[in-house]
Image (tube, grey):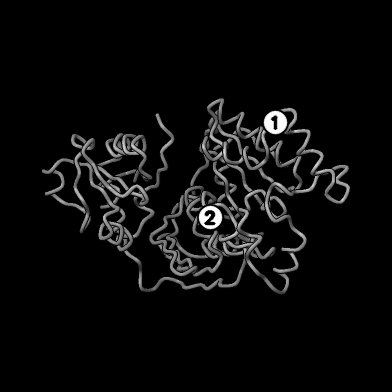
Amino acid sequence: MKNIKSKDIGQYTEEYLKQLAASGQLIDVRTRPEFDSGHIEGVRLHSLSEIDSFEGDLSRTYHIYCQSGKRSQQASEFLKEKGYSVVNLEGGYERFLEHKQEVVKEDRKRLNYSGMQCPGPIVHLSQEIADIELGDQVQVTVTDTGFYSDVESWAKQTGHKLIRLTNQDGVVEAVVQKEEKLVQQTEHTARGTTIVLFSGELDKAIAAMIIANGARAAGREVTIFCTFWGLSALKKPSLSNRKQSGLSGLFKTILPKEPTYMPLSRMNGFGLGNKFMRYVMKQKNVQTLPALIDQAIALNVKFVACTMSMDVMGITSEDLREEVHYGGVGTYIGDVEESTHNLFI
């Protein structure tokens, strides 16, 4: 089975799914009779039996659903093989109907955590949920974009119901309904590895990538959570051309412009150590750090940038590689729950 990106269709609002449909990026792979009995407004029908004739823009991402999720998985694998970027919508139309019936209650409690950084919003939300009755709802507004991923993971771990989740113009809004506390019966997958890359030093970042690529080659699912100085590993060279001022500009002068120039943890010698290390690596046919990162991405290693650290250090999504995901402590804990190895570098 190919490594296909999947999302629970219930995590999308009906409005957002309709937007995807209107742009031609939502595909229903059920049969015509199933489609005619009910479908998401504006969606494009392309049955699984005729998926080999699908044609679309390779630069766009297509979201695929069926009745319950099995056929959409097959269609997603086929389309990915053909070079398309796809997201398999787990749960399918059945799950969509279940969530569509959920209502946002008028008497919900409204909380605004704008300006608060991770882990503040999740911690405060947890406290508020503890103080309300079962079935009551809380609406939370957060400007930390990593909260979008964090609250999804938190809801999954706690068993509370995520009724609505949106991210518009950098403002995340979530409506959460209190449910019975989930009894944790986590079965750790024997094939999961999580790495926290805190260090901004070349040799340690190389070690992290070598471990990650080795683990991925062995069939393990791998997530690398980059925080503080470790964010330098995710930079792209174009950062050196972007002007900054104030504290952000100060960090720019301190931090390396790109992964290649990260210092050594020992004997750096004002940058001479870095040059010597790269020379030796070339002589020994050892891959450079950027090459190792490219390899990790090709192997579907998941890179997550800590949004709180980004804000503190004046780093924006424009500075980082396009393949990077964004999140906070909630996202990290969610990945740890599904791993048996957790390394801090």
Tell me, for residue 286, which label it has, or none.
1
Q: Position of residue 232 (x, y in %)?
A: 68, 52
Crowdedness of circle 1 by 10 Å Cα count: few (<14), some, many (20+)? few
Q: Is residue 137 left or right of residue 103?
A: right
Question: Which type of secondary structure does the marked residue at label 2 adopt?
Answer: helix
**Front residue of this view, candidates 288 and 179:** 288
Identify the residue at image location x=74%, y=64%. 251
Of the residues shown, which amino acid type is indicated by label 1? Val
Tell me, for residue 150, which label it has, or none.
2
Q: Position of residue 342 (x, y in %)?
A: 65, 37
Identify the residue at image location x=52%, y=41%. 184
Residue farthest toward the top in the current orientation of the protein: 218
Question: Which type of secondary structure does the marked residue at label 1 adopt?
Answer: loop
Q: Position of residue 128 (x, y in %)?
A: 54, 65
**Front residue of this view, candidates 154 and 34:** 34
Q: Position of residue 208 (x, y in %)?
A: 68, 38
Q: Measure the C-alpha gap from mark 2 to mark 1.
A: 36 Å
Q: Nearer the viewer, mark 2 or mark 1?
A: 1
Say if 214 sits above or below 9 in the image: above
